[in-house]
Image: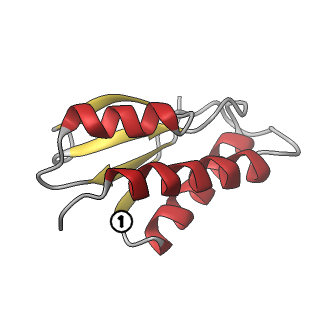
Amino acid sequence: MKIDYEKLTEDLIQARLAAEEAAKGEDGGTANLDTMTIKLPRANEKKVIEAVKVAGLYTRGRREWIGPRYFISPPACGQGNSRNRAVEAMAKVMGEAGYEVLVYYQMD
């Protein structure tokens, strides 16, 4: 799949907006580091990082920990249930846009 970086940026903006909306409300639960991961084969890492940044999100770049994936943090949203809802919303938007995404769940 050839990466359209403008579309990636726009899709990530929509994912961020969905995450911000989903994060509203209670933030009980356990502190966690839930994160959306996205697989972008043969993507230019610098361009992906820029797309994530322009979308108002954060990634440290491609990681090989669970295969070649970008771990993309949700916007500021708390650290309990609100973060979980935010990450799930991001993954839903990106999955519906055709990207291969997984949610990484980590409980502390």
Q: Position of residue 57 (x, y in %)?
A: 52, 34
Foreground residue, 95 or 84? 95
Q: Is residue 63 left or right of residue 93?
A: left
Foreground residue, 105 or 3? 3
Q: Position of residue 85 (x, y in %)?
A: 68, 52
Q: Which residue is mark 1?
A: 99
- Helix, strand or loop under label 1: loop
| Residue 92 position by quadrant | bottom right
Q: Position of residue 16 (x, y in %)?
A: 62, 46
Say above or below: 13 vs 1: above
Q: Give me the residue at 21% from left, 36% from top.
A: 45
Q: Give me the residue at 15% from left, 38% from top.
A: 64
> Which residue is outermost to the front?
6
| Residue 49 position by quadrant | top left
Foreground residue, 57 or 104? 57
Q: Give me the residue at 62% from left, 58% from top.
A: 89
Looking at numbered disc 1 in the image, what kind of residue is underneath it? Tyr
Q: Give me the residue at 53% from left, 40% from top.
A: 55
Q: Is residue 32 left or right of residue 97?
A: right
Q: Position of residue 78 (x, y in %)?
A: 72, 30
> Which residue is outermost to the right?
25
